Amino acid sequence: MATSNHSVGEPAVEKPWHAAYPAPKTTAAVITRETLISWMLEGKLAGKDFVLVDLRRTDFEGGIIRGSINIPAQSLYSTIPSLYALLPTATIRNVIWYCGSSHGRGNRAAGWFADYIKEQDNTQMESRTLEEGIKGWATAGDEYVRMMDEYDATVWK
């Protein structure tokens, strides 16, 4: 969003929310939707066997992958230590992050969380990005749509 800067005469460009934080040092692993759905069809449960984190904000429409939690990306960075602290006691080893396409928020968050895991010398837990995000999931066919809550087909047309 541009705002006027009367002293210079040119519009000032507002920095994106993530510019306030360091860039991730780690490129997180990617999980394909095929692998994730196979886990779900085998009976693995989000919240018990893995955690799914949906980082969409204003584009949060059209449904959510069953079992996901929604964390606004703008508040994520400062909550990483708290989120991490909850997971080992639940023996959760995989945290899967996604946004619309998983090229921005999802990828960045997965990297930050992977950095934190490394800082804790944790070799058991993994931070992953869902390849192609919710858009890839919701448009991949009926077996994926059945694993969504509040699915709205009109959003994905």
Image: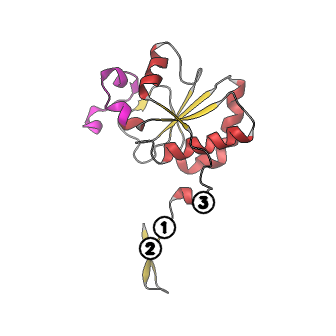
Judging by the rendered image, the residue that carries numbered circle 3 is 20
Q: In which quarter of the image is residue 33?
A: top left
> Residue at point 59% right, 20% down?
49
> What amino acid is found at the position of numbered circle 2 in the picture?
Thr
Question: For the C terminus, which image quadrant?
Answer: top left
Q: Where is residue 83 in the image (x, y as percent from the top left)?
A: 66, 37
The crowd level at tag 1 (other Cα within 10 Å; few <14, some 14-19, many 20+) is few
Q: Where is residue 52 in the image (x, y as percent from the top left)?
A: 53, 31
Q: Distance between the residues labelled 1 and 2?
A: 8 Å
Q: Position of residue 108 (x, y in %)?
A: 54, 47
Q: Quadrant of residue 21?
A: bottom right
Q: What element carries label 2?
A: strand
Q: Which residue lies furthest to the right in this view?
A: 121
Q: Is 74 displayed left or right of 79 in the figure? A: left
Q: Is 116 displayed left or right of 129 in the figure? A: right
Q: Which of 31 and 1 is in front in this view?
A: 31
Judging by the rendered image, the residue that carries numbered circle 1 is 14
Q: What element carries label 3?
A: helix
> Residue at point 50% right, 13% down?
43
Q: What element carries label 1?
A: loop
Number of callouts in the render?
3
> Residue at point 44% right, 21% down?
37
Judging by the rendered image, the residue that carries numbered circle 2 is 3
The crowd level at tag 2 (other Cα within 10 Å; few <14, some 14-19, many 20+) is few
Q: Which of marks 1 and 2 is nearer the N terminus?
A: 2
Q: Earlier in the sequence, mark 2 or mark 3?
A: 2
